[in-house]
Image (cartoon, grey):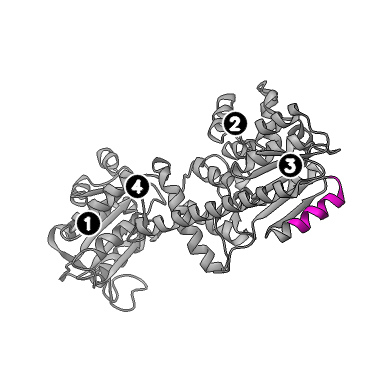
């Protein structure tokens, strides 16, 4: 992995000479400077750039320094912010501190105090990198057969797998799409006495119905049109090992009956053959359906359900184990950083809040896909809100209408207020939570009489979004 880059300084001033002076000083202190000649440019830069220290002039013709401070603090609560001014008053300094500044420097600048600010920001940047590294180390320690989980439900799941693996011959894994049901099946196989034998997965929802029987149990030559040679089925191929029937609820009724017979007798019968064949197979099935309800309604054979459900292993959805998101994120970022040859350290605070508050209908698989995309796009050390946008919000329920056209969701006042609370007041994050553009979000605030929440610079910059 490449070495860490320099900590980043955002310096905002409408005086080009001041910008150049501070840029040279920052370089001598080991900082990469991002000079912005005005508040509007600064607001644009901080949308997609991680910043460790910000020096902000008070008086600028476009967007004032106090408004820039508010926005920087909103984007990154860890950023050190210092107000610069040749006209500062006690009231101005107090207001700057209220908005998130840690100090107020008078012009001409005291470079001794400025050097102290650089040192403090450098230490904070190092501390944050250290915390991200710790999360990565914890993720490694929490890993269990390809799964990561610190939540109590996941720790109980791992303990259950360890107890079951040496003994279970038939098991049913249930959980939503994307929770990792195949990983559980592979863990049961790897920790059991059949680990040296074959693990054979089959996705029941991906097999053409007319070929189910042939795929699972095999056929003899001439058994049906196109059967030009005798072929063993997957049960015979998995003899001595484990067969994993993913989405078992998709099995046609006729195949369900034959699967039940295999479980009861340990024999399979190829299509077109009268001779049964013995197989010794561990059968693990998985479903995202409620098979108990399916069996009660007659849509799934109840006797097969009871045979499969000797032991049920339930995987919780990601929204019920949000404490695992930082560790899953650290693991995926590490994986894709190495894959793409990038030195990605982690996520900015805004991006972390975005992931922590997302609905995740696609669960861990969706989180992994989002972070793979973000690692492809990111250019610096930290993934920002910019790289995450568009990665998963369109996949939320109701986001896509006919022909895949994005529909504007019907968002009420309660949803707006709830999103703002969960986002810590960050309107950009809250807008994405409810599936609105920032412009549409601000219009909803006005519609619901919440315009007091919109600051002056936000109102002025809405047309840019």
Task: Look at the image and say whether residue 340 sits in the magenta stretch.
Answer: no
- Look at mark 1 in the image and give the residue it sits on: 162
Residue 66: numbered disc: none
Answer yes or no: is residue 451 visible: yes
Q: How far apart are marks 1 and 3 (CA)?
A: 52 Å
- Look at mark 3 in the image and give the residue it sits on: 465
Quadrant position of the C terminus in the picture: top right
Mark 2 and mark 4 residues within 8 Å of each other at the beta carbon: no
Which residue lies most toward the left here? 265
Residue 251: % across, % down? 31, 54
Disc on the earlier residue, 2 or 1:
1
Mark 4 and mark 3 residues within 8 Å of each other at the beta carbon: no
Q: Distance between the residues labelled 2 and 1?
A: 46 Å
Disc on the earlier residue, 3 or 2:
2
Quadrant position of the N terminus in the picture: bottom right
Q: Is mark 3 on a helix, strand or loop?
A: loop
Disc on the earlier residue, 2 or 4:
4
Disc on the earlier residue, 4 or 3:
4
Q: Distance between the residues labelled 3 and 2?
A: 20 Å
Which residue lies most toward the front here? 112
- Look at mark 4 in the image and give the residue it sits on: 175
Q: What element carries label 4?
A: loop
Closer mark to the observer between disc 4 and disc 1: 1
Q: How many residues crowd mark 2 within 10 Å: few (<14), some (14–19), many (20+)? A: few
Q: What element carries label 1?
A: helix
Q: Is mark 2 on a helix, strand or loop?
A: loop
Q: What stretch is highlighted in magenta?
A: 14-25
Residue 120: % across, % down? 61, 49
- Look at mark 2 in the image and give the residue it sits on: 410
Q: Distance between the residues labelled 4 and 3?
A: 39 Å
Disc on the earlier residue, 1 or 3:
1
């Amino acid at each position: 992995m490449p070495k860490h880059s320099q900590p980043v300084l955002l310096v905002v001033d409408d005086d080009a000479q001041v910008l150049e002076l501070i840029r040279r000083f920052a370089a001598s202190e080991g900082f990469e400077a991002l000079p912005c000649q005005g508040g509007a440019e600064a607001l644009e830069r901080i949308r997609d750039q991680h910043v460790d220290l910000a020096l902000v002039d008070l008086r600028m013709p476009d967007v004032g320094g106090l408004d820039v401070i508010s926005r920087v603090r909103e984007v990154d609560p860890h950023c050190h912010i210092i107000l610069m001014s040749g006209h500062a008053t006690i009231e101005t300094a107090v207001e700057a501190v209220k908005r998130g500044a840690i100090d107020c420097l008078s012009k001409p600048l005291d470079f001794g105090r400025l050097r102290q600010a650089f040192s403090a920001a450098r230490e904070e940047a190092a501390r944050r990198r250290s915390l991200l590294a710790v999360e990565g180390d914890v993720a490694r320690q929490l890993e269990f057969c390809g799964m990561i989980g610190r939540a109590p439900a996941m720790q109980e799941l791992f303990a259950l797998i360890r107890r079951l693996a040496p003994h279970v011959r038939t098991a049913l894994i249930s959980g939503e799409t994307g929770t990792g049901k195949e990983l559980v099946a592979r863990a049961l196989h790897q920790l059991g006495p059949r680990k040296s034998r074959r693990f054979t997965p089959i996705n029941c929802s991906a097999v053409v119905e007319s070929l189910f029987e042939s795929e699972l149990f095999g056929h003899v030559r001439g058994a049906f049109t196109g059967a030009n040679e005798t072929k063993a089925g997957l049960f015979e191929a998995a003899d001595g090992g484990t067969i994993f029937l993913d989405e078992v609820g998709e099995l046609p009724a006729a195949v369900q009956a034959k699967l039940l017979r295999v479980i009861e007798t340990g024999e399979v019968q190829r299509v077109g053959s009268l001779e049964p064949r013995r197989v010794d197979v561990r059968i693990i099935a998985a479903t995202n359906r409620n098979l108990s309800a399916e069996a009660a309604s007659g849509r799934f054979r109840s006797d097969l359900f009871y045979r499969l459900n000797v032991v049920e292993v339930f995987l919780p959805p990601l929204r019920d184990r949000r404490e695992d998101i930082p560790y899953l994120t650290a693991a995926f970022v590490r994986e894709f950083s190495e894959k793409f040859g990038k030195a990605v350290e982690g996520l900015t605070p805004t991006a972390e809040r975005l992931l922590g508050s997302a609905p995740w209908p696609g669960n861990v698989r969706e989180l992994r896909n989002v972070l793979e995309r973000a690692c492809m796009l990111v250019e610096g050390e930290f993934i920002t809100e910019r790289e995450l946008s568009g990665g998963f919000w369109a996949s939320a329920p109701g986001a896509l209408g006919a022909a895949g056209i994005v529909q504007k969701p019907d968002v009420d006042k309660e949803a707006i207020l709830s999103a703002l609370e969960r986002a810590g007041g960050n309107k950009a994050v809250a807008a994405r939570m409810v599936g609105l553009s920032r412009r549409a979000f601000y219009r909803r605030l006005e519609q619901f009489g919440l315009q007091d929440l919109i600051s002056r610079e936000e109102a002025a910059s809405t047309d840019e979004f």
